[in-house]
């Protein structure tokens, strides 16, 4: 079987091997909120018009809504829902492979995709019930559509570019960053006088047009959400947290990619317009330093497909420049050997101590998006916590108060999944604080929260109950 046929199968097998073991992990705060607050709404229209917080990633939520309606009876609901990001991951890898194997070279794009597939960020977002991997899929499709439009300039090609842009911003508005990366990548195809060509400005303006088209009917809600100020106050820290994962995931490829870029730049007749593609690497830094509040680092994960193409192209240029035409076979062997190098790097770094060390530099367990967020750690045990609660309150006659740090939405989802009534778990939220609890109520806190403070708030003392699970402790309110 030719490599061209075997490699995509191996890449798909790698995606499934990396993601499926994690597809059954319990939902965490944002995921459970997506399901319980938005995806359960009666229709796609209701989801669209309920854009009250950015957690409602509308296009993604509509897909989750559809999966809920067609969930197989008796199957694990969480596993079923997580098939959405798994399929998006498969689609992203296949789109990049088939579209860019000729542009970047079969072995170069395979090596880059292999490095991405075995990386921890790919596992996290490839199983996350959030819109980030779906966004990466839209960006990969948008990249192919933009290239077709730049090369052919037809109405059909523009329509495909417009639809993929609409889907991207309709999933997450900040996917404008990914679409900006696409525009910068395609810009050199218009030549040195790109700024004189109406077709280029149509390409560049389409994402903004689609943003207005999608959110225009709900403009007041959109503007309100955009003014919430969610993100990081420290722009440099946010940039580091967004960029460091890229460097770690593609570490084996960084040196040959840098040298390959140097070979291209110093080549006689290099056209300056191609430096626009280098500006793609500066998008996270620019956004983090210019915006009043730096975006969450996870905002830039949908740009990774464009990063992958840039790296694959640069690595191919290195092989061609270093080995030359006379040793083309040696260059091919080098590109092939990059793949076992990728797996060697993965085997050396795939342990919790390595991930935790980098997580501390990227926001810690509660702020890190890429290495070891708290919901990917062994101490995140909502199902086991529910069993402890069931032993203390088998009839569900008391209320359970869950603090914000104990991940109340995850607990609520797990409780409902386990048969508890939907109003059993109460917690503070935007609609107000819990003002009172009955005597004997259960209280779930994280182990670093002082029980005396919470007990005093509800006019009593907290008695610690046996059976701590992970970072959570269960108490009973005694007056």
Image: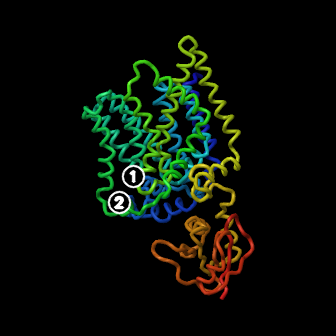
Q: Residue at x 71, y 74 (%)?
A: 391
Task: Say whether disc 2 or disc 1 marks the residue closer to the N-terminus.
Answer: 1
Q: Check the picture and name the quadrant holding the C terminus.
A: bottom right
Q: Is residue 237 left or right of residue 157?
A: right
Q: Secondary structure at mark 2?
A: helix
Q: Nearer the viewer, residue 461 or 172?
A: 461
Where does the image place residue 395, in percent across and percent down from the top left? 65, 78
To which quarter of the image does residue 244 belong? top right
Is 473 placed above or below 296 here?
A: below
- Assess whether mark 1 and mark 2 are in contact (beta carbons under 8 angstroms): yes
Horizontal relation, residue 183 to residue 241: left or right: left
Q: Residue at x 64, y 73 (%)?
A: 444
- Kind of element beneath mark 1: helix
Image coordinates of residue 296 in percent, x first then y, are: 49, 54
Which residue is label 1 attached to? 173
In the image, taking residue 18 as reference, residue 309 lies left or right, namely left
* Residue located 33% across and 50% down the image: 211
Give the colour scheme of this rendering. rainbow
Q: Quadrant of residue 445?
A: bottom right
Give neighbour class at mark 1: few <14, some 14-19, many 20+ (Cα, 10 Å). many
Residue 421 visible in the picture: yes
For the point 31% across and 63% down, the residue is 220
**Numbered badge on residue 222:** 2
**Image quadrant in which the N terminus is located:** top right
- How far across and how far down the image is residue 289, in percent? 44, 50
Measured Cα–Cα span from mark 2 to mark 1:
9 Å
């Amino acid at each position: 079987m030719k490599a061209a046929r075997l490699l995509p199968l191996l890449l798909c097998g790698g995606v499934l091997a990396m993601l499926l073991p994690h597809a059954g992990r319990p939902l965490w705060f944002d995921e459970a909120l997506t399901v319980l607050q938005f995806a359960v709404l009666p229709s796609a229209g209701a989801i669209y018009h309920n854009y009250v917080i950015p957690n409602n990633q509308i296009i993604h939520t509509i897909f989750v809504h559809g999966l809920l309606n067609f969930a197989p009876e008796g199957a694990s609901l969480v596993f079923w829902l997580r098939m959405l990001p798994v399929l998006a991951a498969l689609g992203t890898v296949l789109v990049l492979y088939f579209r860019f194997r000729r542009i970047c070279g079969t072995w170069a794009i395979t090596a880059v995709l292999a490095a991405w597939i075995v990386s921890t960020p790919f596992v996290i977002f490839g199983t996350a019930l959030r819109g980030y991997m779906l966004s990466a899929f839209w960006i990969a499709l948008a990249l192919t559509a933009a290239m077709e439009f730049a090369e052919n300039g037809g109405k059909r090609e523009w329509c495909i570019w417009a639809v993929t842009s609409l889907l991207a911003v309709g999933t997450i508005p900040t996917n404008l960053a990914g679409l900006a990366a696409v525009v910068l990548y395609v810009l050199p195809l218009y030549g040195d006088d790109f700024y004189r060509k109406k077709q280029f400005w149509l390409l560049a303006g389409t994402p903004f047009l689609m943003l207005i088209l999608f959110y225009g009917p709900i403009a007041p809600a959109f503007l309100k959400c955009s003014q919430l100020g969610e993100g990081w106050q420290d722009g440099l820290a946010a940039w580091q947290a967004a960029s460091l994962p890229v460097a770690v995931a593609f570490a084996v490829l960084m040196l040959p990619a840098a040298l390959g870029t140097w070979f291209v730049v110093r080549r006689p007749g290099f056209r300056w317009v191609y430096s626009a593609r280098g500006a793609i690497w500066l998008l996270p830094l620019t956004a983090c330093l210019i915006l009043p509040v730096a975006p969450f680092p996870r905002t830039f994960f949908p740009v990774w497909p464009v990063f992958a193409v840039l790296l694959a192209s640069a690595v191919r240029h290195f092989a061609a420049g270093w080995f030359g035409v006379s040793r083309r076979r040696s260059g091919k062997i080098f590109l092939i050997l990059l793949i076992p190098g990728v797996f060697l790097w993965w085997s050396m770094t795939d342990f919790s101590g390595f991930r935790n060390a980098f997580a501390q530099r990227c926001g810690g367990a509660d702020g890190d998006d890429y290495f070891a967020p708290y919901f990917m750690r062994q101490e995140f045990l909502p199902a086991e916590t529910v069993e402890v609660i069931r032993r203390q309150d088998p009839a569900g006659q008391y209320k359970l108060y869950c603090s914000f740090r104990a991940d109340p939405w995850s607990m609520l989802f797990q409780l409902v999944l386990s048969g508890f009534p939907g109003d059993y778990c109460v917690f503070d939220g935007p609609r107000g604080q819990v003002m009172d609890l009955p005597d004997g109520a259960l209280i779930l806190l994280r182990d670093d929260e002082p029980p005396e403070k919470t007990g005093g708030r509800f006019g009593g003392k907290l008695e610690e109950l046996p059976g701590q699970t992970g970072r959570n402790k269960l108490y009973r309110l005694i007056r």
